[in-house]
Image: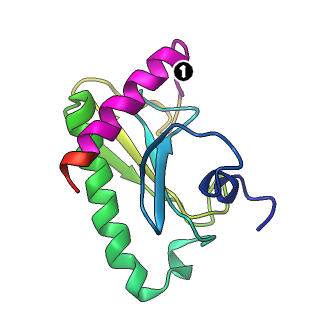
Amino acid sequence: MEECIFCKIAKKEIKADIVFENENFISFLDKSPIFKGHTLLIPKNHIETLFDFPEGYLKELAVETKRIANGVKKGIGCDGILLINNNIISQSVPHFHVHIIPREKGKLLRGFMWPRTKYKDGNEEEEFREKIAKAIEIFK
C-alpha cells in the first residue's frame, strides 16, 4: 500500500512521535488528539480492518493495546482510558488502528470524537511522548 500514511509511518518514511515499537506493531501520538496523550496503535503490516486480522495476530494486538493503555494512564496520570477502533464506517485511515485516549473525570466528550485539541508546541508534544514511552517500558 504505497499511499497509506500509516504504512509510511511504520516504515519511518513519515515522522511520528513514536512511544512504542516491536516487530509487528508501532504506537505513536495522534496528530489531532482528542485529549493530550491520545495515542494510536497500528500493525506494521497493512491490515485494513479487524475483520482482516490473521487469528494468531489478535492475541498480540490485545497484549500491545493493554501495554500502551497502561503506559498512557501511568505516563500522564489520567483517570481512565477510552479505546476506540472504527472498522470501515468512520475509519479515517484505511489501516487498522486503535485509538488509546486518556480520560479525566469531568472532562466530557462533545460530539464523541470532537472537538480535537492541539499541543502548545513540539516541546509539549515531546513531553507527552516521553512520559508515555517511559511508562510503556514498565509493562514490557
Q: Which quarter of the image is occupied by the N terminus?
A: bottom right
Image vertical order of residue 3 relative to residue 15, above or below: below
Q: Does residue 119 sit above or below 37 in this rendering?
A: above
Picture quadrant of residue 37: top left
The residue drawn where x is 59% and y is 71% is 45
> What is the number of callouts on the image?
1
- Residue 16 % position (x, y): 58, 40
Name the residue located 25 percent from the left edge and 33 percent from the top edge.
75
Q: Is residue 110 magenta?
A: no
What residue lies at 44% left-to-right and 42% top-to-bottom? 39
- Identify the amino acid type marked 1: Lys
Q: Which residue is mark 1?
A: 118
Residue situated in front as seen by the camera: 84 or 44: 44
In the shown orientation, is residue 75 left or right of residue 32? Answer: left
Q: Residue at x 38, y 40 (%)?
A: 101
- Left or right of 62: which side holds 80? left
User: Which residues lie in the magenta part?
Assistant: 115-136
Residue 104 visible within the image: no
Up/down of 39 relative to 110, above or below: below
Q: Position of residue 100 (x, y in %)?
A: 38, 47
User: Does 125 appear in magenta?
Assistant: yes
Mark 1 burial class by Cα count in 10 Å: few <14, some 14-19, many 20+:
some
Quadrant of the rendered structure where residue 6 is?
A: bottom right
Pick out the residue farthest to the bottom: 55
Q: Nearer the viewer, residue 4 or 131?
A: 131
Q: Where's residue 93, x and y in %?
A: 66, 55
Helix, strand or loop at mark 1 = loop
The residue most toward the top is 120
At which x and y percent is residue 49?
A: 57, 71
